[in-house]
Amino acid sequence: MHPVLKGIRLVGFDLDGTLVDSVPDLTVAVDTVLSECNLPPQGENRVRDWVGNGSLMLVERALTRALGKTPQASLLESSHARFLEEYGQSPTARTCLYAGVRETLDALRERGYELVVITNKPHALIEPILSNFALSDHFGLCLGGDSLPQKKPDPAPLLYAARHFEVSPEACLMVGDSRHDIEAGRRAGFRTLAVPYGYNHGEPVSDSGPDAMVESLRELI
């Protein structure tokens, strides 16, 4: 067992960029919306750097880049609604689990850890992804970016999860790929663990100062 798990009872996981590589499906939805607006596609490399602050911000970043200016509120609203529709129709066609995820979640569940998904993705999109990979039963709670008034890097979702399972923050670990995960964990009083393979706006997640890093989640077990 990795030392970062010593004394830990609850493990919170980010979703996109930590458990699954969802950028291919997100890109298809983003570029479809842009095409319908007669705007140029942005492609996976750019979308990869835009993920992490929720779907509305993702669409806003794509529109801003394609337009060369901040989009009008009406365009952003309609484009975001269209994005959710398009992405919701096929959120797992190209999405895959990162190496080591399934065996790690299996092992942690067998050892009695409370497992939680804490993501900025809309809550309605979490279950289709987990179900596609037969992982729904691994998690006792799933929180999306719209589950509470606040989302990461605000610590509120993490603290909600700790209260839900009656676990003190000091006995909780937040696992993620971005500075938002590490900041939320630090502010909540959680221990933090980062993976370097996800999405962090083109910056090394190590710069955020996590308590520990692993190249693969397999290192936890």
Image: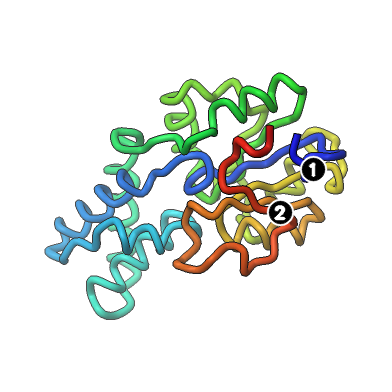
Q: Residue furthest bottom?
A: 69
Asked whether the beta carbons under mark 1 and mark 2 sit within 8 Å of each other, the answer is: yes
Quarter of the image where the N terminus is located: top right
Quarter of the image where the C terminus is located: top right
Is residue 89 something that shows in the picture?
Answer: no
Q: CA distance from mark 1 to mark 2?
A: 9 Å
Residue behind mark 2: 212
**Residue at 19% of width from left, 61% of height from top?**
41
Point out which mark residue 3 bears.
1
Point out which mark residue 214 bears.
none
Q: Secondary structure at mark 2?
A: strand
Figure check: 169 above or below 152: above
Where does residue 191 sit, x and y in percent of width and height?
Answer: 78, 51
Using residue 131 as the reference point, say whether residue 176 is left or right of it.
Answer: right
Where does residue 159 sit, x and y in percent of width and height?
Answer: 76, 48
Q: Amino acid at mark 1?
A: Pro
Figure check: 87 above or below 56: above
**Residue at 43% of width from left, 63% of height from top?**
57
Using residue 136 as the reference point, say whether residue 166 is left or right of it.
Answer: right
Residue 115: name its quadrant.
Answer: top right
**Residue at 63% of width from left, 56% of height from top?**
181
Q: Secondary structure at mark 1?
A: helix
Q: Amino acid at mark 2?
A: Ala
